[in-house]
Image (cartoon, grey):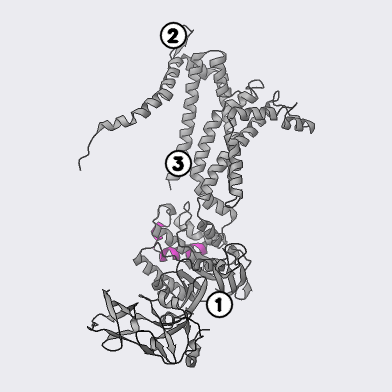
Amino acid sequence: MARISLDHIRHAYGPNPKSAADYSLKEVHHDWDDGGAYALLGPSGCGKTTLLNIISGLVSPSEGRILFDGRDVTNLPTQDRNIAQVFQFPVIYDTMTVYDNLAFPLRNRRVPEAEVDRRVKDILEMIDLSSWAKKTARGLTADQKQKISLGRGLVRNDVSAILFDEPLTVIDPHMKWVLRSQLKRLHKQFGFTMVYVTHDQTEALTFADKVVVMYDGEIVQIGTPAELFEKPKHTFVGYFIGSPGMNVLPARIEGATADLGGGQVPLGFAPQIAANAKVELGIRPEFVRLGREGMPVTISKVEDIGRHKIVRALFADRPMAIVLGENGEIPSEPRITFDPAAVNIYADSWRVSDPSTAANGRA
Amino acid sequence: MEKTWNNKAWFMVLPVLVLVAFSAVIPLMTVVNYSVQDTFGNNEFFWAGTDWFIQVLHSSRFWDALQRNLLFSVIILSIEIPLGILIALNMPKKGFGVPVCLILMSLPLLIPWNVVGTIWQVFGRVDIGLLGYTLAALGIPYNYVNNVFDAWITLIVMDVWHWTSLVVLLCYAGLVSIPDAYYQAAKIDGASRWSVFRYIQLPKMKRVLLIAFLLRFMDSFMIYTEPFVITGGGPGNSTTFLSIDLVKTAIGQFDLGPAAALSLIYFLIILLLSWIFYTVMTTSDAQN
């Protein structure tokens, strides 16, 4: 277990990167606390896997250093880093038995056989494959194979960190839930530092204490699930987290008021914005109130998804999503108001914070 | 659901059947015909029964040649298979080196067999050959014409030069099909170079190795052209393999009966050994 520090890491796959666009990983400068459970969330191709491989040493960064507990490991090969990693698609040694597969990482590190036996049996129990222990791994289903991959990552209990690269993609939904809970339990029990890459927000939010959102090779926000939901630092976070994502509307700021074209929204403060910045207002569909007062909208579609309804509307010629309670009514002349506390203002896609509560603002 | 029987479908395989009949079955049957009869020309045949088979199986000529064949196959397999794997493992996986290596590797395979024989026949000559002359100049006694050991070495080196590429190409095909994630997982699991070979690369190469092994065994067991060109079966009978012996019997001495019996025995040996290898290698696979 260790604190992992990424010191100004940049990475480009091609040689001689010149512009920012050549970097698949723009500057990442971040500490992963010892024993933290992190989710690395972002769309495909945003650099999540690259960042993970840099931590495990499968990729060495073009620039920057990696430190484990303050010790520079940038030039240390994967084998010497004491990291466990689980990949997206199952990797099994198909000539070995299930048992030997799980014992492999331990035996390679010359763990005494009695200890190997104890830990492998624990893991077999956990991934529910005890009855398969003596069978060769070849005949297993994709599900079971991935459980073995997962088990190989968890069998070593002295690792600095366990990295998961979308490990549950091939597992069916029910099992996903079970395994995720078991991972959480293990985390509580042993206090591993865990980094979990995913593009599934539910997975990220249920697994992690802290979610790291990446976009286009950059970390755009690190925060608790609540922070990501209430105060997205970047319009991308607003759009990516939540279902449906945040409504982002072009706005003009006049003092402490935002002019949306279709109406005025009072703000609690007067945002300071550079003259030629692109200004937007973000409001989550959950905080849009549909009623007989406020700004007029045109409703185009209502999706009933069980516990609530999603109303698709046009506001000032822009599409807008509104979440309405199960028994919520839609008035004949619908109008909307925004929950003032949930309104966020963005300048060039980055959140503008209220100077009086700047502690929560952009670092 | 009632199964419909439509025997007309058999006509679809008729062309292949006719082709195979003319190219393989009928020639084979004429050989069978010769093997049980005696002839002195003029299309006169006398029934000989199993006499020729008994004669062949009792001749030391046959057993000596068979032993040479087996020895030759064992030697070249035990060199070409490990060497082929070793070269394949060290070939570049990407970049400019890949086409270069692949072309270099395929070159020997593109050369006709009698040309390969001629190349090495000239190469090894003590008077004008680069190899023979150089060795002689270095004071190393080497002469494949009158030294049994030198003749064998020449044939083995030639076969290794000619055919290791085949093993390399097959193994390489097996190796490049292994996804990167396997190597990454092995690194994470702290596997040694040997473990990576033993548990990842070898299992993935197993199928192609089986093919390489069978092809190389059958080909080396049937070797004819190269020793015929280089040594002509000599010195003495030391490089007279079954195939060379067969041609000597059939065309040199015109003993068609014994030659036919010998070719059938030869054919059955190859068939039997290939079947044994294949069965042994695939059942060890299926047990898992």
Q: Position of residue A344 (x, y in %)?
A: 42, 85
The amino acid at mark 1 is Asp
**Label 2: few (<14), some or many (≥20) within 10 Å?**
some
Q: Secondary structure at mark 1?
A: strand
Of A296 and A42, nearer the camera is: A296
**Label 1: few (<14), some or many (≥20) within 10 Å?**
some
Give how far apart the Cα atoms at labels 2 and 3 are.
Answer: 45 Å
Q: Residue A239 sits in which quadrant? A: bottom left
Give how far apart the Cα atoms at labels 1 and 3 are.
Answer: 52 Å
Q: Which mark is residue A31?
A: 1
Residue drawn at x 43%, y 18% as measured from the top left: B32
Q: Which residue is mark 3?
A: B282
Q: Is residue B126 above or below residue A208?
A: above
Left or right of B216? Residue B31 is left
Q: Is residue B213 above or below residue A51?
A: above
Q: Secondary structure at mark 3?
A: helix
Magenta stretch containing residue A129, yes or no? Answer: yes
- Dot 1 falls on which chain? A
Of A140 and B181, nearer the camera is: B181
Q: Earlier in the sequence, mark 2 or mark 3?
A: 2
Can see residue A215?
A: yes
* Magenta extent: A115-132
Q: Which mark is residue B45?
A: 2
Nearer to us: label 1 or label 3: 1
Please say if the residues under marks 1 and 3 sit with CB atoms less than 8 Å apart.
no
